[in-house]
Image: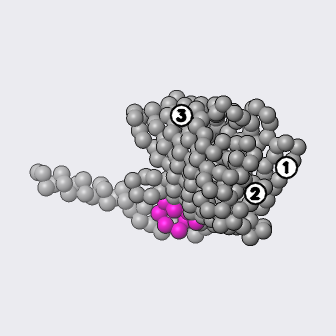
Amino acid sequence: MTRRVSSVVSAMVLASMIPLMRPAAAGAQVADDAIYTFVLFDRFEYRRTGDANPVGWDLLGWVGGDFTRLWFKGEGDQATVGGGGEVEVQVLYGRLVAPYWDLQIGARVDVRYGGGTERARVLTVLGLEGLAPYWFELEPAVFVSQDGHVSARLTTTYDMFVTQRLIAQPRVEVNAAVQEVSDFGVGQGLNDVNVGLRLRYEVRREYAPYVGAEWLRRFAGTADLARQRGEAVSDVAVVGGVRVWF
């Protein structure tokens, strides 16, 4: 009796798989051809630093399929005391080169303004975006400006689930440059290290207010340029904001 039931179940499973085993009809659309979109405001926050107290934002989005995508990235700060700020925008072509990893190439535009002046530059971007073992999100990139100045950046984040809705996210960003670019506060060598920790509560998966803290430390020539502008070499900020995606 048991053997008969097992045979019946096996036959039912095989019958249910027959439609999946048939080749796709000519001209039929498969999942790989579908176009998707994704937009994430990973950070939209107010920073209390005791100085400029800026409003900061960090945007990531893409449109495309499973293998090729057009990426949009942007971040910036707008001071609420004294005016001035900076904006960075990237437009990239991405291609899946390994599970969870996109190779990206494109352009980046930097704009800094304040004190009655405005400076801009264009850079070529070559980078990766993906998940390392143990689900660390990594984003290494190399940049070459229109003047041949070479720089690099590594950003990593990790989501630690305190509960299903309460999530702590450490974030580390490291910047370095081969040449000094004083107009953009960039020195030669290691530029700065930015370490942050944000604790968010997901009211919905798409909407999560958060609080946290961030520590920035400038080094070498970048620290010297900051001193010349009257800025702190090391800074600690308390942050509060919201993370939204759709």
Based on the picture, tell me whether residue 180 belongs to the magenta stretch: no
Residue 6 placement, left or right of 93:
left
Q: Residue at x 70, y 56 (%)?
A: 186
Which residue is tagged 1? 118
Query: Which amino acid type is shown beneath numbered disc 2?
Result: Ser
Q: Secondary structure at mark 1?
A: strand
- The CA span between labels 3 and 2 is 31 Å
Report the residue at 85% width, 49% height from top. Answer: 118
| Residue annotated with mark 2 | 182
Residue 159, compared with residue 27, is above or below; it is: above
Q: Residues within 10 Å of mark 3 (few under 14, many from 20)?
A: some
Q: Residue at x 76, y 31 (%)?
A: 81
Q: Is residue 30 visible?
A: no
Q: Position of residue 27 (x, y in %)?
A: 61, 67
Report the magenta residues as a range: 96-105
Pick out the residue farthest to the left: 1
Closest to the camera, between mark 3 and mark 2, is 2
Q: CA distance from mark 1 to mark 2?
A: 14 Å
38 or 229: nearer the viewer:
229
Q: How far across and down, in percent of the image, does residue 171 sit?
A: 52, 46
Residue 77 visible in the current orientation: yes
Helix, strand or loop for disc 3: strand
Q: Which element type, helix, strand or loop, lies under badge 2? A: helix
Residue 96 percent coordinates (x, y): 55, 65
**Side (left or right) of 1 relative to 185:** left
- For marks 3 and 2 on the same chain, the one whose residue lies earlier in the sequence: 2
Q: How many numbered marks have been drawn onto this rendered protein structure?
A: 3
Q: Amino acid at mark 3?
A: Gly
Q: Nearer the viewer, residue 84 or 109?
A: 84
Q: Which mark is residue 47?
A: none
